[in-house]
């Protein structure tokens, strides 16, 4: 499996799991994020603050997992 496929699979799985921490992690029809009171993007279905926070966390987790598997 390529690195990009691994990343996409990891993100898809973790976005569902992080729904409680980041309320707009799963795209919905909401117009506003209940956590940040920010506008939700029309294409992404997630607000910018949630997206930025979530992807920083996901990147750190992914790197940690990759290093754990390599050891």
Image (spheres, grey):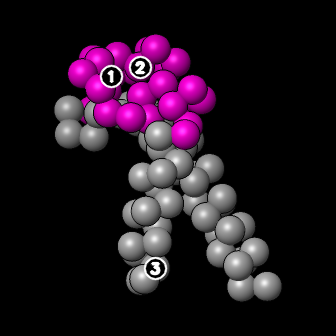
Magenta part of the protein: which range? 17-41
**Residues at marks 2 and 1 touching, judged by CB atoms closer than 8 Å:** yes
Identify the main secondary structure in magenta: loop
Q: Is residue 43 visible?
A: yes
34, above or below 41, in the image: above
At 51% from the left and 31% from the top, the residue drawn is: 19
Helix, strand or loop status at disc 2: loop
Using a 10 Å C-alpha cutoff, classify the residue at mark 2 as few (fewer than 14 neighbours), some (14 to 19) or many (20 or more): many
Marking on residue 28? none
Q: Earlier in the sequence, mark 2 or mark 1?
A: 2
Name the residue that disc number 3 marks: 3
Name the residue that disc number 1 marks: 39
- Residue 30, horizontal then vertical, whole percent: 29, 18
Q: Is residue 47 magenta?
A: no
Q: Earlier in the sequence, mark 3 or mark 2?
A: 3
Q: Is residue 30 magenta?
A: yes
Q: Earlier in the sequence, mark 1 or mark 3?
A: 3
How far separated are the C-alphas under marks 3 and 2? 31 Å
Which quarter of the figure is the N terminus placed in?
bottom left
Name the residue that disc number 2 marks: 33
- Asked if residue 69 lies left or right of residue 5, the reply is right
- Residue 20, horizontal then vertical, whole percent: 57, 26
């Amino acid at each position: 499996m390529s690195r990009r496929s691994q990343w996409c699979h990891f993100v898809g799985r973790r976005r569902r799991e992080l729904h409680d921490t980041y309320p707009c992690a799963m795209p919905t029809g909401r117009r506003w994020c209940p956590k940040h009171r920010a506008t939700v993007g029309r294409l992404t279905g997630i607000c910018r603050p949630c997206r930025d926070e979530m992807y920083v966390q996901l990147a750190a987790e992914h790197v940690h997992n990759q290093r754990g598997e390599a050891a």
